Image (cartoon, rainbow, N blue to C red):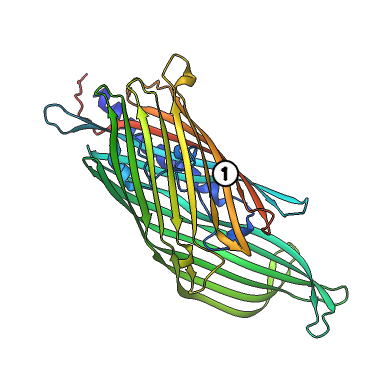
Amino acid sequence: MQLAKSIMLKKIGFIKILFSVFLLCFSLTLFAQSNSPYSRYGLGDLSPRSNINTRGMGSISAGYADILSVNSNNPASYSQFQTFIEQRSKKVAQGRVVFDVGINMENRTLIQPNNANKFTSSDLLFSHLQVGLPITRHWGMAFGIRPISRVGYLINDTAQVRDANTNQPIENAVTQFRGSGGAYLPTIGTGVSVKNFSIGFNAGYLFGNRENTTLRSLINDSLLYYSSEHSITTSYGHLFFNAGIQYAITLKDDKKGNNTILRLGLDGNLQQNLNASRDVLNQTFTRGSAGEELRIDSVFQNTGDKGTIVYPASYTAGFVLQNVKTNGSGWLIGADLTKNKWSQYRFYGQTDDVKDNWMLNVGGQVSPRPKENYFSRVAYRFGFFTGPDYVVVQNKLPQVGMSFGLGLPLPNYNRLSQSQYTLVNIALEYGKRGNDNNLLKENLFRLSIGVNFTDLWFGKRTFQND
């Protein structure tokens, strides 16, 4: 009975760790203080879609499947979770459960063309949390949560107010634009395969909020003007669905476990409508002794205004060509092409400065032959991405970047569970958004760290009484 108790304690401890990590990672985003003026448009700055291990490979995902991580972008990959079959009954004896979690550390620099001034902000952010569960040999499921977008900007502008008739300056005005918020997507999905063909879908609830505020104050040495505030606070949410397919082609198989597989993938979502509710406030105010806003007069106020936010369709097609040998070595290359229909985006029926865009992601991985040297068991990853941003203010915002990643296996010292396997994934990304033709250029350096805990569960066990 001692062994049974140890197994039960292990699983209870796993659940406690999962819940604790979720609370910790989710709280990171709540205290983020980024400043990205482009997040004012659309749903904000879009968060990385992929998990940490594929992010080191340029964020490829459409044709990717792995027994040690959860690829929620294409739920067809859930069918590839590892299982072990009992010889006599031909039923699943054990399945490898995957716990995949990650965080991002971002450093963002804003640069105004032909201006030496720069602004830099750093954040520690929640990346994703996913759990993968094999059900049968060719059927798996997964659930988790990841951020979709983030809104965060604070801009101060000083300008002169001019007379409408004479165009002469009257007063100096200080205007502050600020915004905050973001969107999240918890999902649960399943994937099944029949021979070489896999299909899967995710169902979730996309929810979020955003607050956009404009403050203006007039500066005069002899007259006192009250400041004005115009703010719109919006919350939204609705059921969300996406689906994917994968098809595996065996190019080489020498019957000894050395094989080369080409996996084709396609995933995406249709246009979906999000239910929204917004509060609008126009007021005049003054500052108290502690700097707080004290309302003088509410010029206009409307609460609970119902409407719709249209979330656009998105499609990704790609492939992964992978070579695996019996000794664990091998290589992988892949590419994705994503098309986003942001011209469909509507906020309460209104368009925004967003356009359709595309993104090309290319990457690969090399796993050297296992030796006594630890670094020969490390997976080395690389990739790049390019394509215009979906925000278009005056001119298109070109994007380009590169990535490098490592998959670091950790030793297992747990005698009661020799099947446990832990992998630390590290991804370094450097990206540029905009050029000298844009109002602002943005350089982004992102360090992402993820941990994949895996273990064999659901196996039939024989216990010995003391």
284 in relation to 190, above or below: below
Q: Amino acid at mark 1?
A: Gly
The x, y position of residue 73, in whole percent, is 39, 48
Looking at the image, residue 432 sits to the left or right of residue 265; the answer is right
The x, y position of residue 457, in whole percent, is 28, 33
349 in relation to 60, above or below: below
User: Which residue is denoted by mark 1 in the rendering?
Assistant: 401
342 in relation to 385, above or below: below
Residue at 36% across, 39% down: 15
Mark 1, other Cα within 10 Å: few <14 / some 14–19 / many ≥20:
some
Residue at 54% across, 49% down: 29
* Residue found farthest to the left: 88
Q: Secondary structure at mark 1?
A: strand
Q: Nearer the viewer, residue 349 or 245?
A: 245
The x, y position of residue 162, in whole percent, is 80, 78
Residue at 55% across, 56% down: 389
The x, y position of residue 13, in whole percent, is 37, 34
* Residue found farthest to the front: 251
Looking at the image, residue 281 sits to the left or right of residue 135; the answer is right
* Quadrant of the image occupied by residue 174: bottom right
* Quadrant of the image occupied by residue 230: bottom right
Looking at the image, residue 448 sits to the left or right of residue 417; the answer is right
